[in-house]
Structure formats: C-alpha cells, structure tokens
Amino acid sequence: MDPRDAERLLVDGDPLRDGAAIATRLLAIDEAEAIREALHDAGIVCQLRLVKPGGVTGTRRDPHLDSSYSVLRPSWNVVVAPGDLAKARALAEARLGADVDGRDDTAAAADGETQVVPVELCRLVWDDAWALVERLGRMQIRAAVGTPTGDRDLEEQEVPVLVLPQDLGYAQKFAGITPA
C-alpha cells in the first residue's frame, strides 16, 4: 500500500484509526487474506496490514526462506474497529480452523458470554508452581502459572498459580492450602 493511502485511512472518523489486530500471533499472507475475505463477506470493515517486513533479497528459490518458520518471512495481521474485535476473531477462527488469539473461548466471547477470571491459589517459585499445575491437571483441575513480575532470574521468582473460582476450594484441599 502506498504510504499516502495509509495516511489517508488514518483520519478522524475512520473506524480503523485506532483499530485492533485480530491475531495475537504473526500471520502468513494466505492466512491474513482468508481472514480479510471472511470479514469482508460478513460486512466487517477491516484492513490488511504488514506487521513485519520480509528481508529476503535475490532469488527466492530456497524453501527455508518461504517456510513459516523463517524469521525473514513477511508477517501480516488484519485490523478491525475495536467494537468488532470479538466477532471478527470468532469468524477468523471459524474460517481458518485455527487459533488466532490464544484463547479457547473466542466464540463464547463473541456471543457476549461472561468470561470467568481465574483466581490466585497460591504463590510459589517457578519450578514448584509448574509442578503444582501439573499435579492439579492430573486431578482434572484446570490451572495455570501466572505472569512473573520480578526482575530476578525466572527460577528464583515467585509466581501465582491460578485456578478457576469454582475449583478454588477443591484445589486448596488438594494442595494442602488453608483458605485465607
């Protein structure tokens, strides 16, 4: 796209001025085009945008350069108005048959269903937190390790172990944690 056209698209009142990217991962051009086509067919205003330009020069006969694992491969995303994001992601995932946003409840979010927010079970050092998540998983309790917040080495940091609110009591009993 000509840079002047891109500038023209970002004027006040343009629904994509403060647009939200559909995917939270990099998309190949064929994935991005499929998403754009699906959104266009559904009447959702969208724009294909280059996220990371490719640095491939010369002949492009090397299959490694065209591989989806190549760091040189150009990457794309599709931008929609923030109000259309949930519906657009659900449509994109249905069209591609693949996850684009790292969530397993995209369709539910698009339908306006309330999303359950995990709660903190406890805080443990990194390796212990992952060991507890694994043990909880074997007991059919969905759990995850939260985001580290310190600046020390990862193995030394305490991180939250998260569970769903409805599983908190059972997880506390299983882990031998007394409620606060």
Image (cartoon, grey):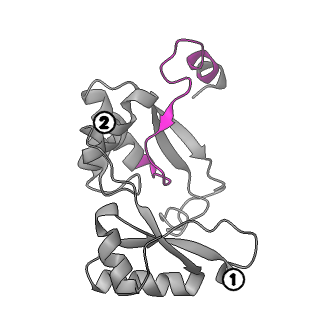
- How far apart are the alpha carbons under marks 2 and 1? 41 Å
Instruction: Choose between 95 and 65: the one closer to the eye.
Output: 95
Quadrant holding the N terminus: top right
The mark tally for this picture is 2
Q: Position of residue 89 (x, y in %)?
A: 34, 42
Q: Over which residues does the magenta segment extend?
A: 6-30
Horizontal side of residue 35 vs 80, given as left or right: left
**SS for tag 1?**
helix
Q: Quadrant of residue 158?
A: bottom right
Foreground: 123 or 65? Answer: 123
Q: Are marks 2 and 1 in contact (CB under 8 Å)?
A: no
Q: Is residue 148 left or right of residue 61?
A: right
Q: Residue placed at 41% from the left, 86% from the top?
A: 176
Residue at x 56% of width, y 51% of height: 74
Of residue 124 and residue 134, the one placed in the foreground of this image is 124
Question: Of tags 2 and 1, which is closer to the observer?
Answer: 1
Q: Is residue 143 magenta?
A: no
